[in-house]
Image (cartoon, coloured by chain):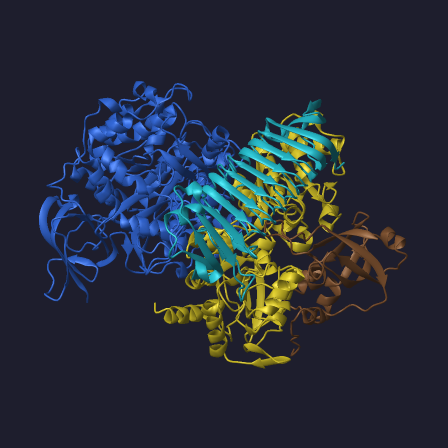
Chain colours: A brown, B cyan, C yellow, D blue
Amino acid sequence: MKFILNTGRSITQGRHVEHKFHRGYSEETSTCFIHPLDLLDLDMEEGEHVEVTSECGSVVLRTVNCEDLRRGMIFVPMGPFANHIIPSHTHSTGMPDFKSIPVELEYTDAERSTQWDLMEKIGGQRYEKM
Amino acid sequence: MKVTLEVRPRRKPHLPIEAEKIVPRTFFEETDGLSVFRGNKELALEEIFSVAIEGEAASVDGVEITILGDSSRIKRVGEYMDGGRIHVMGDIGMHCGNFMSAGEIVIDGNADAWLGREMRGGTIRCHGSAGDFCAAGYRGEKRGMRGGTVEVFGDAGDFTAETLAGGTVIVHGNAGDLAGVDMKDGVLTIMGDTSMACANMSGGRAYVHGTVYDMIPTFRNIGRETVGGDVFTRFAGDIANRGKGTLFIRNYKYMD
Amino acid sequence: MKKCDVICPFCGCLCDDLEITVEDNRILGVDNGCTLANAKFMGKERLTSPIRRTDGGWEDINYDEAIRYTVDMLLDADRPLLYGWSGTHGEAQCIGVHMCELVGGIIDSTTSVCHGPSILAIQEVGHPGCTLGQVKNRADVVIYWGCNPLEAHPRHMSRYTTYADGYFLDNAFRDRTVVVVDVRETETARVADEFVRIKQGGDYAVLSALRAIVRGKGDMIPPSVAGVPRSQLERIVRMCKDAKFGAVFFGLGLTMTKGKYKNIRNAIELVDELSRHTKFTITPMRGHWNVYGSNEVFTWMTGYPYAIDFCRGIAFYNPGETSAIDILARKECDACMIIGSDPGAHFPRKCVEHLADIPTVVIDPVPTMTTAMANVQIPVAVSGIDAEGTAYRMDGVPFRVKKVIEPTLPSDTEVLGDMFARMKEAKGL
Amino acid sequence: MTELLIRNACVIDPINDICGEIMDIAVRDGKIVESVGSGAEVIDAGGSLTMPGGIDAHTHVCGTKVNFGRYMSPEDMRAGRTARRGHMHATSGYSVPTTYGTSYRYSAMGYTTALEGAMAPLEARHTHEEFAYTPLQDMMANTLFDGNWPVMQAIHDGDIKRVAAIVGWTLSAVKGFAIKLTNPGGTEAWGWGKDVSSIRDVVPHFEVTPAEIIRAMIEANEMLNLPHSVHLHCNCLGKPGNYETTLETFDLVPNTNDKRQSLYATHVQFHAYGGSSWRDICSRSEEICRAINQKPQIVMDMGQVMFGKTTTMTADGPMEFNLYRLYHNKWSNHDVELETGSGIIPVYYNRKNLVNSIMWAIGLELALLTDNPWQCILATDNPNGAPFVKYPEIIALLMSKRYRNGVFQTVHPDTEHNVPLAALDRELTWKEIAIMTRAAPAKALGIVDIGKGHLGEGADADIAIYPLNINEIDPAKAPEEVIRAFGQTDYTIKRGRVVCCRGTCMVDGENTTIWVNPRISENHSMDHDPEFARNFDKNYTIRMRNYPVQEEYLQRNLCIETEARL
């Protein structure tokens, strides 16, 4: 099903900004807030995972009901998960479309990655000394 | 005088090359010791291009520059061009034809952003597509392109003809968001579709032969009018801005 | 021991009334701070030594090696990018500009992914603004547009707007009308007097409609604009015109959506139009702590607020071309130094991928997502906790942030100062 | 110990009554001395005009408002860019250059000291930060009090001592130099989108008038024994007919200080308009100068307008909004809580425009009609009337009737019916120019005693050597020589070091911030006033404890301590 992806700050994301290797950060930034009726249409229950796919990739997120949203829009707190699928095009303004990306949602039984997994996938090296 | 510049392969092919020297007047005046920049490194023209020059020119208009190879990251070609001809066989990087006042630039491939920025005169024809801010202005400057013609045979990006203040812009394909935004004068023609066309326009004329999506709600519908055999809806605006522009549209759709 | 009137180093509000309890050079508690401030002050997971990426792991190195690596990297590069700056204080940003000028690189701050578009708009039409105290003491209409202060700037409403006392308002909470415009019904929207729910990407159209209504041309507006009934727009315009002092705050909901900086331009022009009827001001909700300071410093030193390209010696400015996202996505830099920000977490993947391809140094107290992309990371003291310096609030008011504990690591100023000295030496200056 | 000897200097030093004498100047450790040893570095001035370093008594170059002018103007930035070279950093900008740009260009013109015209106390740290990056001039900051709440409350209560105590506390807290009033009362009214239209209007809520503010501040200024007088940007700037307000304001000023004026009226050109609208605006320079000539207690600066592009910026928020409505160009505004306002718009002064032509003429008339050059300082209210790089042209206009007439031919043809300029034959002398650009500013600012504006023994060795022989050049006949020479010194010497040589700056530089600290007895100090502190923390959005500018912002600095008489 087609949705518009919106990203932004959340207070939990903000609390973890200086603690990005914590599980809490990973949890929060890999959450897909979605209208309960949309979830119903997807034939899914809250807490199940979705694969969210944009023109430039896909990522697995965990669904959470949220009636703040209009139907057809999902919200993902800003972070490495959302950015995994956000196109880099800025319309030559310097600013990517962090808030209005057309995406496709599909149920998946796959596990979510960790933030370090995502980084390693694109050539990074995890740092887990702490 | 025929100048042929063929782009050589580079070790860091993505780093842009700034080549504002590639303009007919430079070659008309002096062909030796020309340089271009890769980032902070000044390089001889020959390091980036294989250069061939044939013949002499009696005036700047007698100089024709042909650019071959992958020139998609070569920026500022034709900046301040005041005569002669540049023919780009492939794609061209940003800022091609900045401040151009006369002469002709023909691009067979695509042009990157800011094609013909703040152009004053002359002609640019781009047979592929043009990037964002095609025929537009500079940051903070009230007036963008002021004269000349930019014709794009493919699509054009967002903010096409932004702050247009004179001259003619023709896009044969579609234009991105906000074509003609803040335009003040001049003529913009889009044969395909665009969205939020001519927002905040204060003067000039624009024709959209396709559909305007997310039509700005503050244009006053004047009625139907036939232009060149096609029936358009004529709008006046942008009323939000005391605008005195005229917008002709074949089809439009508001975001209601 | 309690330290009073401490300035928070988290968001652009720069709340300066925090009380920090310190014993044995350790922070035990934070009073008056929001949850974000608490997390920042109480954070314990700092790096204690510079690290270098090895084949499949990390090793500790000393400061001398780490600084040498960075200096060599920047001096060797054809087009280095010096990015970040919002998490550090002004004095360090000044050194950063000098470094960039000397090596011939590009300097950009997190502005380009927050209020860069606002700056582009301001450069077209100006900015009718004010300090936050004007709003606190006078504003009877407050509009939050595309922002969610309760989550992003948790004390904004209690210090400066809704819940703050106002000198000219008898009962500030009752006498102020708060309007929220958003696509989501956020926490902030729920406490507002009026919530305007707008369709995604419809901000520009709604702003244009409001401008036309203010100008008395409302008759031509379609009955619904981007999901908002005309009657609601008309009500809001009445509210604004009747205000004694109106204040608009806007966030990334306006800068990151369709229309980009032209949305902001439209919002500013709406405020200009309203200024003909009553007092109105507009303020961007700057997010990352000292991001506004980076704009101030870059501006007085280079002439431009962000995205400055010194490769050709003179300053060249063209966001969209010289801004960090574009440069990384187009692979147009060949080395990168990152300080006081985390593009690994906050940039689109394609940009982060390029960081993995080029030599990258991160200057940051804690491991971040960008750490994964770094060749070297240099830990430093945290501005506002164990380092001091200047920071600018979202409204341009400068503060001197203090140390609340004694540092065990060098500050940004010291690390960058050392780098700059070595660069000058290498260049024979 | 470093020593320098300037030989064969043709010196004009009005404060020491030296006019065109060929002499040597000896310098030791940054000060002018009687003589130096044989090991001193020698500069042969070869008979060139040598004067104390220039002092700009009113310029906007550092701080929040100026920086916002830069921030919003990338098109101005690209109009003047230079790359890093030697000791010089990269610069950008024309009308609002970067701090380095400002500093280098002033230095090339022989200017070594400048007064920032307007600093909002709340944002003082910003001004001081920029001072640190304006390395080749000693800097001081006018501190804005035009809409200061506690001050207006104390004036309303009739408690001038309290006014003085608040001002003293604030100046010392923000490391300011002098009291600046910009459209007094008007900036507070602008907090509601309103303005005052005369000095008798009542400021909303605070129930005081501009006249009361001005008078009280003059009195407080003298109680505090400040080196400079009140520095006033009169009400009604830029409005046709405003000369009446200006004259009424002048009538408020007592003659209370025998060392200097009691009021400094800044950019008076903008306050000398007759008429009732833009259609019948005319010059009232004669009336203004008649008043000035009768009132030694007032010193003014010209506020000269020059044709071309510039940026206007002032704390006078409502005035800028009026300009915006006139020009429809971009407009910025920045009100500062409890203190003041500010506004910025770019303008283009067009010689084909009658109003602009009249403005241009009025500035010159003020200088030519003021009998005593000590009472009229050369300035453009940089960048409001014109960028300071236009000073050499202004000097030429004042020294050459022929040049003036030539330019007059190019302005709007109706100008001559609205201004007396064409009838003025006066041509200023070298000495008068020296007074208007260094001696009078030093005296008016009260910094002669700390060694500014003259070349006597003990003075700071701030010296400008211009490539010009005054015995060979007739300025009336060779204005282009005057412009060239004043545009670029052979040597600009600051604190005994050559800092700029033919336009190239030779050192990184390190300026001095000059500020005042009035000593106020404990029982009057705001530090011990619980009511002040309570209201401060209640009304400001900054804690009182975080408000003062910390020592860290003063690198080199010179504090003028005064004894307050409360």
Residue D218 drawn above or below residue D561:
above
Which of these two is toward me, B164 or D61? B164
Q: Residue at x 40, y 61 (%)?
A: D552
* Number of marks in picture: 0
Quadrant housing the N terminus of chain D: bottom left
Q: Residue at x 47, y 63 (%)?
A: C92
Which of these two is toward me, D47 or D251? D47
* Side of D379 relative to B245 (left or right): left
Which of these two is toward me, B27 or C57? B27
Which of these two is toward me, C103 or D442? C103
| Image position, residue D54 (x, y; %) | 25, 47
Q: Is residue C287 visible?
A: yes
| Image position, residue C42 (x, y; %) | 62, 69
Q: Residue at x 34, y 27 (%)?
A: D357
| Image position, residue C74 (x, y; %) | 48, 68
Q: Quadrant of residue C174?
A: top right
Q: Quadrant of residue C98?
A: bottom left
Q: Is residue D517 visible?
A: no
Residue D31 drawn above or below residue C415:
above
Residue at the front extreme, as displayed: B55
| Image position, residue D557 (x, y; %) | 32, 58
